[in-house]
Amino acid sequence: MKNGLDETDMGILRLLQKNAELTNKEIAVQLHKAVATIHDRVRRLKEDGYIKRVVAILDRKLIDRSLIAFSHVLLSDHTAETLHNFETEVAKFPEVMECFQMTGQFDFILRIATSDMETYHDFYRNKLARLPNITTVQSFFVLSETKSDTAYPL
Amino acid sequence: MKNGLDETDMGILRLLQKNAELTNKEIAVQLHKAVATIHDRVRRLKEDGYIKRVVAILDRKLIDRSLIAFSHVLLSDHTAETLHNFETEVAKFPEVMECFQMTGQFDFILRIATSDMETYHDFYRNKLARLPNITTVQSFFVLSETKSDTAYPL
DNA sequence: CTATTATCCATAAAATTTACGGTTTTTCGG
DNA sequence: CCGAAAAACCGTAAATTTTATGGATAATAG
């Protein structure tokens, strides 16, 4: 197969997205293949970039990141320089977990993780709002996480 | 130590958040501890829930999830039943990666992953908009991912 | 039809995980 | 400050897993 995934590859990705601690043997049993086959496939899936990385997901409440905010940012202009400058500067803040440039009413959505509202406020006033060319920032706070999945259904 | 993390625990979490494929030996070298010590610590960090799970992160472009949308949902009322019904029903859609109940102007933010705009439109019309008690849905689309991190700085 | 390539797998070697036991360090009540 | 208890730490060895190898089988292409 030139460049596509067969049912075995899909099965591996399905399983490893949910639990990357499975051994090759456990995967092999579930997919009815030999251990060496699974090993080859997983190596290839990594080489080819399907699996970008394997990470530990922490309980954010236990490591003092109880507050998640989504911040909608509008910039004063959209020159390449302004956009690029904002992106690189905002990415440096450790509170910023994600930054997306968006279509529509605002230019960026940020996902911010802090310990509490006071810490967010400090971040907002002393870091985010001080970046150049910012027109408005609207902040929304997570009351509860109903669903939170890193695994794409395959 | 009763219930807190020392520098070794933090070091382990820092490393495993970035790359959970590190062996205990590799971690041990970096943190100047014995392999068995790291093994004990990691087991405890999992038992105590600090590490919720270990997962493979896929390249979504390669598995046909090129389009990410943030959908802001406003409900017609906020009775416990309406809220709960929306949460449980929306969580069933495979396109919905995340669902947060929010403070502020709208009630929920959803992160939706689909292959393209047409597929999103289909999801929107035939699934999301058909849920009961929905007043408005505003959709915003990701133009580019500037920063995307699952690891909290520790 | 044959050569080439890809898939699959059994096996064995290398490396890692895991269990065990004992030493050292820390904690804490008296 | 002392001594007991608990916790942290580590070396070793057994169990398991990963990784490399080579060969058999199936699919593909010329």
Image (cartoon, coloured by chain):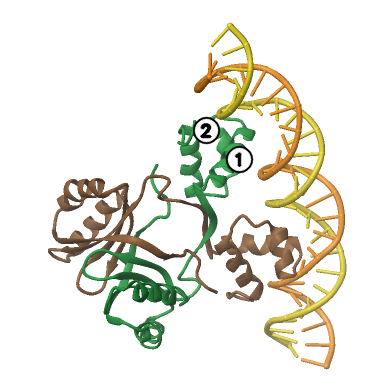
Chain colours: A green, B brown, C yellow, D orange
Q: Which residue is rendered at x = 70% and y = 69% of the image?
A: B31
Return the disc, 2 or 1, that comes first in the chain's sequence.
1
Query: Which residue was labeled with disc 1?
Result: A24
Give the secondary structure at mark 1: helix
The residue beneath circle 2 is A31
Nearest to the observer: residue A84 or residue A150: A84
Q: Position of residue A6 (x, y in %)?
A: 46, 33
Q: Residue B93 at what x, y percent from top left?
A: 29, 48
Q: Residue at x 28, y 70 (%)?
A: A107
Please state which amino acid type lies under the numbered disc 1: Asn
**In the image, which disc is placed on residue B49?**
none
Q: Nearer the viewer, residue A65 or B46?
A: A65
Image height check: is B66 above or below D27?
below
Which secondary structure, mark 2? helix
Instruction: Work out how far the residue at label 2 is from the one at label 1, CA to CA, in angstroms.
Output: 10 Å
Q: Chain of mark 2?
A: A
Q: In the rendered view, does A140 fall on the left or right side of D15?
A: left
Q: Give the amino acid type for the residue marked by disc 2 in the picture.
A: Leu
